[in-house]
Image: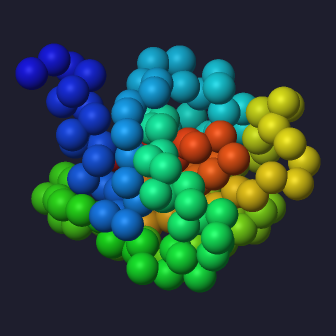
Amino acid sequence: MGWRQGLRQRARQGIPALLEVDALLQAHGVLAALPGARIAPGLVRFQLAAVTCEGLQGQGLRWLQGARQGRGTVAGRVPRYRPWKAGAEALAEIGIGGLPDDWPAHAAVYGCSSIDRRHWLLLLPERAQLWLGWSG
């Protein structure tokens, strides 16, 4: 198994099962693509599956209510997440100062952090992207 596939499988364990991903988009230089993110030991970007984008576009935060627990163990435990938030409140929840300059001003953005604040998730449905960040 290559490093990219290993990283994808490990990172995927921290993502709730409701959030389907198709591909690992970026693992190196990812902070440059998300200005305003605090420097973290881990930050990866995934492409969201079409079914996830459809759920988000149709129901938004209501659809995310069932996405508050990781798929499997990460560092010996299953990540559990705080309630999802939308817009600027989502960015504040996960400690991000802003989105890329080319991001549409009124596009949806959702985020949440783990109970222990060691992991966070950011969803950008218009770009079909899920960002997973972690520390320690």
Q: Is residue 17 above or below residue 25?
A: below
Q: Residue at x 56, y 42 (%)?
A: 129
Left or right: residue 72 versus residue 89 is left
Q: Is residue 31 above or below residue 132?
A: above
Left or right: residue 8 versus residue 88 is left
Q: Is residue 93 above or below residue 44?
A: below
How far across and down, in percent of the image, does residue 51 sit? 46, 57
Q: Residue at x 72, y 32 (%)?
A: 35
How far across and down, in percent of the image, does residue 46 sit? 45, 38
- Residue sitting nearer the eye, 78 or 129: 129
The colour scheme used to paint the residues is rainbow
Can residue 57 be seen? yes
Res. 20 image quadrant: bottom left
Q: Residue at x 37, y 66 (%)?
A: 18
How far across and down, in percent of the image, does residue 96 sit? 69, 48
The residue sitting at the right extreme is 105
- Residue sitting nearer the eye, 96 or 53: 53
Left or right: residue 93 versus residue 74 is right
